Image: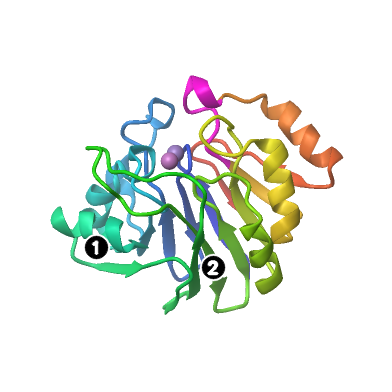
């Protein structure tokens, strides 16, 4: 099966499996680079949130309420959504898996921090490993440093591709992302968390060239672009 992936800027992607639309880390209305995207038009079936930082949850409440999507995240992030009136939710925590309508998700470690936009405690940051009903599998790393825990993902899953942060400063950089791709066992990865702010600007062509030289395909999408994978 081929799935469609649409990029909404920063770390926000929507996957369309053909039956379900799964949105990750919506940060759109406060992202100047994503000003062409209308948040009100997003109608996902599921919203996955990796952690509580504003650049990952800013539009989550609005999108969940508009769409009725089921929000999935750590216990703390789900409690925060609940306090804002989001009712269709599913809390998880690190190491746990759950079978959803589209397939199975395991919530995995991310080495980062996590607090809500008001500074309150947001639990620990996370990544997700998806295994769709047809067997296709991918890793959404969230915000993370390179960590040897990624080897465990490579040992447990046969991934088709991964979403990895590459912007440096707040997360791993491209060099570490290439190492991460090796550890989780993918040849192709979609870059995220770059070029949104001055701290995380990259040279896109040089980045693609570097990844290729290391035997990896780095996919950098345009905001609003949809690809088939
Ligand atoms: Ni963060
Ligand atoms: Mn971030």
- Identify the residue at image location x=59%, y=32%: 168
Q: Quadrant of residue 75?
A: bottom left
Disc 2 C-beta below 8 A from ligand 2 = no
Q: Quadrant of the C terminus?
A: bottom right
Give the left or right position of residue 202, taking residue 205 as reference: left
Quick one: 94 or 225, which is closer to the camera? 94
Q: Which mark is residue 68?
A: 1
Give the left or right position of residue 62, taking residue 135 as reference: left
Q: How is the image coloured?
A: rainbow
Relative to 52, residue 18 above or below: below
Q: Quadrant of the N terminus?
A: bottom right
Query: For numbered disc 2, what is the local secondary structure?
Result: strand
Relative to 211, residue 15 above or below: below
Q: Which residue is mark 2?
A: 130
Query: For numbered disc 1, what is the local secondary structure?
Result: loop
Quick one: 142 or 48, which is closer to the camera? 142
Local packing at callout 1 (Cα closer than 10 Å; few below 14, some 14-19, many 20+) is some
Q: Position of residue 87 (x, y in %)?
A: 18, 65
Q: Quadrant of residue 191?
A: top right
Q: Position of residue 197 (x, y in %)?
A: 47, 24
> Is residue 207 one of those drawn in magenta?
no
Quadrant containing ligand 2 reads top left
Local packing at callout 2 (Cα closer than 10 Å; few below 14, some 14-19, many 20+) is many
User: Is residue 161 shown to the viewer in this render?
Assistant: yes
Q: Earlier in the sequence, mark 1 or mark 2?
A: 1
Give the left or right position of residue 209, taking residue 228 as reference: right
Q: Position of residue 190 (x, y in %)?
A: 63, 47
- Identify the residue at image location x=77%, y=40%: 211
Mark 1–mark 2 Cα distance, whole angstroms, equals 21 Å
Give the residues in magenta: 192-200
Q: Position of residue 123 (x, y in %)?
A: 34, 54
């Amino acid at each position: 099966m081929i799935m469609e992936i649409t990029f909404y800027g920063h770390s926000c992607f929507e996957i369309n499996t053909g039956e379900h639309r799964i949105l990750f880390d919506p940060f759109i209305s406060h992202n100047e680079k994503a000003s062409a995207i209308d948040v009100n038009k997003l109608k996902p079936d599921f919203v996955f949130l990796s952690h509580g930082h504003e650049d990952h949850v800013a539009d989550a409440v609005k999108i969940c309420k508009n769409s009725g999507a089921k929000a999935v995240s750590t216990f703390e992030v789900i409690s925060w959504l609940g306090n804002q009136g989001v009712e269709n939710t599913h809390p998880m925590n690190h190491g746990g898996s759950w079978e959803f309508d589209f397939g199975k998700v395991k919530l995995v470690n991310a080495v980062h921090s996590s607090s809500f936009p008001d500074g309150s405690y947001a639990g620990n940051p996370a990544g997700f490993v998806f295994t769709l009903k047809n067997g296709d599998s991918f890793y959404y790393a969230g915000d993370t440093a390179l960590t040897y825990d990624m080897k465990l993902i490579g040992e447990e899953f046969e991934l088709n591709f991964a979403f990895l942060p590459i912007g440096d400063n707040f997360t791993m950089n491209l060099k570490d992302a290439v190492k991460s791709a090796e550890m989780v066992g993918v040849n192709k990865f979609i870059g995220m968390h770059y070029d949104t702010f001055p701290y995380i600007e990259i040279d896109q062509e040089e980045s693609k060239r570097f990844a290729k030289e290391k035997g990896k395909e780095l996919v950098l999408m345009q905001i609003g672009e949809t690809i088939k994978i």
